[in-house]
């Protein structure tokens, strides 16, 4: 039973997130032969001012 947890910067449309979730489910099915009903996907959207790399937030990189 795969549990896939992903953090992603906020700002995607509902359609983009839905497509992303579908792609993650398909990846689990094709790579580890997981059954769709046994796969859980959690997508956490992080505000851009709360995510940094190299001490610069995504919001600051803008």
Image (tube, rainbow, N blue to C red):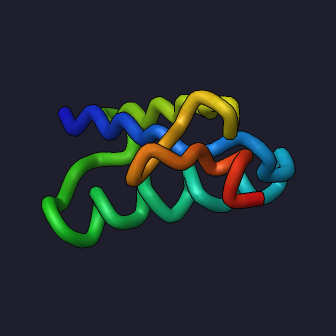
Where residue 11 appears, as percent x and y from the top left, is: 79, 47
Where residue 28 appears, as percent x and y from the top left, is: 28, 57
Q: Is residue 3 above or below residue 36?
A: above
- At horizontal 68% and vertical 59% (from top left) the residue drawn is 61
Look at the image and tell me in which quarter the C terminus lies: bottom right
- At horizontal 56% and vertical 50% (from top left) the residue drawn is 21
- At horizontal 53% and vertical 48% (from top left) the residue drawn is 56
- Front residue of this view, candidates 32 and 59: 59
User: In the picture, residue 19 is in which quadrant?
Assistant: bottom right
Look at the image and tell me in which quarter the N terminus lies: top left
- Front residue of this view, candidates 46 and 14: 46
The answer to whether residue 1 is left or right of residue 11 is left
> Can I make out residue 14 in this image?
yes
> Can I make out residue 18 in this image?
no
Residue farthest to the bottom, as pictured: 30
- Count numbered badges in the picture: 0
- Front residue of this view, candidates 48 and 40: 48
Q: Is residue 23 above or below residue 39?
A: below
The answer to whether residue 31 is left or right of residue 54 is left
User: In the picture, residue 39 is in which quadrant?
Assistant: top left
Residue farthest to the left, as pictured: 32
Where residue 57 appears, as percent x and y from the top left, is: 59, 44
The answer to whether residue 26 is left or right of residue 48 is left
- At horizontal 43% and vertical 36% (from top left) the residue drawn is 41
Where residue 22 appears, as percent x and y from the top left, is: 56, 57
- Front residue of this view, candidates 15 and 1: 15
């Amino acid at each position: 039973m795969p549990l896939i947890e992903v953090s992603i910067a906020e700002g995607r449309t509902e359609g983009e997130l839905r497509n992303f979730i579908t792609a993650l489910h398909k990846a689990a099915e094709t790579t580890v032969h997981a059954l769709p009903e046994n796969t859980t996907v959690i997508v956490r959207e992080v505000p851009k001012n709360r995510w940094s790399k190299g001490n610069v937030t995504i919001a600051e990189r803008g």
